[in-house]
Amino acid sequence: MTQKQAAPANEVHLVGRVSGEPVVRELPSGDELVSLRVVIPREPRRGTSRAQVDTIDVACWTGALRAVARRLPDGQGVQVDGALRRRFFATGAGRASRYEIEATALRRVRLP
């Protein structure tokens, strides 16, 4: 059996619902960032019936993506394409980091 050679990739495709209102922030550099949260249901773990969700932070940097993100209401179905990024920042307790999706495409979708 031969192994198929794969190229490194960082590609993310999400479909879920917007949770809350998008947040617009002006960074110290003067750049603007619009961020939103997307909630995606997942199958319950074996042996439980409790519904579970993943809550994913999405960052929109380009003007076109920021414009789309600003118009997404709470509960709206959304499709996000992008890449997983780890962002580092300073807090009162020191340095911290978080993972988020840096969006390259964002569009409304109808969900059941």
Image (cartoon, rainbow, N blue to C red):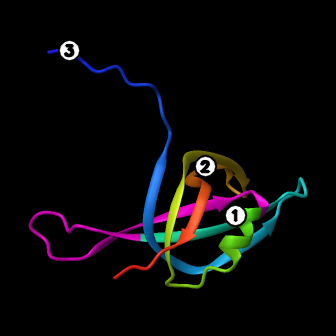
Front position among marks 2 and 3: 3
Left or right of 33? Residue 69 is left
Q: Quadrant of residue 49?
A: bottom left
Which quadrant: the N terminus? top left
Left or right of 45? Residue 26 is right
The three-letter amino acid code for the residue at tag 1 is: Leu
Residue at mark 2: 97
Taking depth in this image into account, of 15 and 37 the one nearest to the observer is 15
Left or right of 30? Residue 86 is left
Q: CA distance from mark 2 to mark 1?
A: 23 Å
Residue at mark 1: 65
Task: Tell me the crowding category of disc 3: few under 14, some 14 to 19, or many 20 or more residues within 10 angstroms, Cα based.
Answer: few
The percent position of residue 62, horizontal first and vertical second, equals: 75, 57
Question: Residue at coordinates 59% horizontally, 45% vertically from top-left?
Answer: 86
Q: Earlier in the sequence, mark 2 or mark 3?
A: 3
The percent position of residue 33, horizontal first and vertical second, equals: 75, 62
Q: Is 42 contained in the magenta span?
A: yes
Please tell me the numbered disc located at residue 2.
3
Task: Tell me the crowding category of disc 2: few under 14, some 14 to 19, or many 20 or more residues within 10 angstroms, Cα based.
Answer: few
Q: Are marks 2 and 1 in contact (CB under 8 Å)?
A: no
The three-letter amino acid code for the residue at tag 3 is: Thr
Relative to 35, does residue 7 appear above or below in the rendering? above
Front position among marks 2 and 1: 1
Helix, strand or loop at disc 1? helix
Q: Quadrant of residue 5?
A: top left
Magenta part of the chain: 40-63
